[in-house]
């Protein structure tokens, strides 16, 4: 497997070699097309190069796998450390359904995020096959030799003027060829096309052999809204979530070579917000945690802080920022935003929360209102380390530290 690991906001130049792997011009062209397809949100196109933005994850194109990793400093950090950080963040935010990184039974020398997603997906499908795949009723219109269901007169007359022995009908069918299995079948096809390691490819072929043959249908984002939800379909929740992610990020005609492109990318600003929210909810302290509460601000425009904490009658606001602020100050726009949040949510304290190598917190200071001291709204600046002090494992108790800053 040809793999290049690069950090967010770094640049890849074509015809340059990175860790023994060459980033070629046709890779550059394919990524440029992908970026145009998504309104230029993933990269900045430079002369002979691609500069990555805040999106992290993995891209596979023309035999090359590019891992884009998060990073909060400019030190020479080990790529494997930040790869584990990304995987753990995805796990904690439930974007990746594994208990730990070692759960993926692939070659540890070449493990990457795509392997883990594919391994998780195939394991889930195997589990469903073992438990027994469900059947569902669906309507089918066809020209049959027996009268079955409702006779479609217009279609029957147009199709069977010659074939007097046939009936054009709409009838109900109860079998395994239904929408849910058609979605999974499509995802299995993509995994087969994009699996490069012999282990995952052979495992995918084995699963395909055990999976029933179903119709191939075009699948878009709207298709997933048609999935029926019931007690019988509940075991399919995880596999459908992964299927959706794989199918909607598959670009079959964008690469310059014979292979297709698959891009699984996450906005680090959103992932950081969701990660902090998940860690806060893991805390056993007696507080209530809310994410994405919104209030109408003006006409149809709403405002929404990232996180709201309730402790008794007190409310606190957190706005997460995935950037290294170092010894700098927050922007004026960020501070204005925090003032508005405090005012609309009747909150006593608000915090701008940044990732850092070391945990530190600036005391909450009051906002000054035309020189008046009556204003009780306060804002603080929090920097929190995501690592344990003695190793590079992610800390699990950062939620407790954040809550303590507010209620001490």
Image: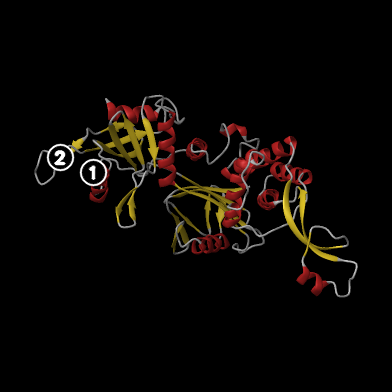
Rendered location of residue 29, percent (x, y) = 54, 64
| Alpha carbons under labels 1 and 2: distance apart | 10 Å
Q: Number of numbered discs present?
A: 2
Residue 355 location, quadrant: top left
Q: Is residue 13 left or right of residue 293?
A: right
* Residue 94 spot, x, y in % from top left: 52, 38
State the SS at label 1: helix
Residue 199, above or below 333: above
Point 53% across, 53% down: residue:
17
Circle 2 sits in a helix, a strand or a loop, which is it?
loop
| Residue 199 placement (x, y as % from top left) | 71, 41
Residue at position x 28%, y 41% in the image:
345
From the image, tell me which residue sits under label 2.
375
Question: As rendered, which of 314 and 124 lies closer to the eye?
Answer: 314
Asked if residue 329 can be seen in this view, the reply is no
**Residue with the mark numbered 1:** 343
Instruction: Please determine whether, in this image, residue 168 is positioned above or below residue 308.
Output: below
Residue 165 image-quadrant placement = bottom right
Q: Earlier in the sequence, mark 1 or mark 2?
A: 1
């Amino acid at each position: 497997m040809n793999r290049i690991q690069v950090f967010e906001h770094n640049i890849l130049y074509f015809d340059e070699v990175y860790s023994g792997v060459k980033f070629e011009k046709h890779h550059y062209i394919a990524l440029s097309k992908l970026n145009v397809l998504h309104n230029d949100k993933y990269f900045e196109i430079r002369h002979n190069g691609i500069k990555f933005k805040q999106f992290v994850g993995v891209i596979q194109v023309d035999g090359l796998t590019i891992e884009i990793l998060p990073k909060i400093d400019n030190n020479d950090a080990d790529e494997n450390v930040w790869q584990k950080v990304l995987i753990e963040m995805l796990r904690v935010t439930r974007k990746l359904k594994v208990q730990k990184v070692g759960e993926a039974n692939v070659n540890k020398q070449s493990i990457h995020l795509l392997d883990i997603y594919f391994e998780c997906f195939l394991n889930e499908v195997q589990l469903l096959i073992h438990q027994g795949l469900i059947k569902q009723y669906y309507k089918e219109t066809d020209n049959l030799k027996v009268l079955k269901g409702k006779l479609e007169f217009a279609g029957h007359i147009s199709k069977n003027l010659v074939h007097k022995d046939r009936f054009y009908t709409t009838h109900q069918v109860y079998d395994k060829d239904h929408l849910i299995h058609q979605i999974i079948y499509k995802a299995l096809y993509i995994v087969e096309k994009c699996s490069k390691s012999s282990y995952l490819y052979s495992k995918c072929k084995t699963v395909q052999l055990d999976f029933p043959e179903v119709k191939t249908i075009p699948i878009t984002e709207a298709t997933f809204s048609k999935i029926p939800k019931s007690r019988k379909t509940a075991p399919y929740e995880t596999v459908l979530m992964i299927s959706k992610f794989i199918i909607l990020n598959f670009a079959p005609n964008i690469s310059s070579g014979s292979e297709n492109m698959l891009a699984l990318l996450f906005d680090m600003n959103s992932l950081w917000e969701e990660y902090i929210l998940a860690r806060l909810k893991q805390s056993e302290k007696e507080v209530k945690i809310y994410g994405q509460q919104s209030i109408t601000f003006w006409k149809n425009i709403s405002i929404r802080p990232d996180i709201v904490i309730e402790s008794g009658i007190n409310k606190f606001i957190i706005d997460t920022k995935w950037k290294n602020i170092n010894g700098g100050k927050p922007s004026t726009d960020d501070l204005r935003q925090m003032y508005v949040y405090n005012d609309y949510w009747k909150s006593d304290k608000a915090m701008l929360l940044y990732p850092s190598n070391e945990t530190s917190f600036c005391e909450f200071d009051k906002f000054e209102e035309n020189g008046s001291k009556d204003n009780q709204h306060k804002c603080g600046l929090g920097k929190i380390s995501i690592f344990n002090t003695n190793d590079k494992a992610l800390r699990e108790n950062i939620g407790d530290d954040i809550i303590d800053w507010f209620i001490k």
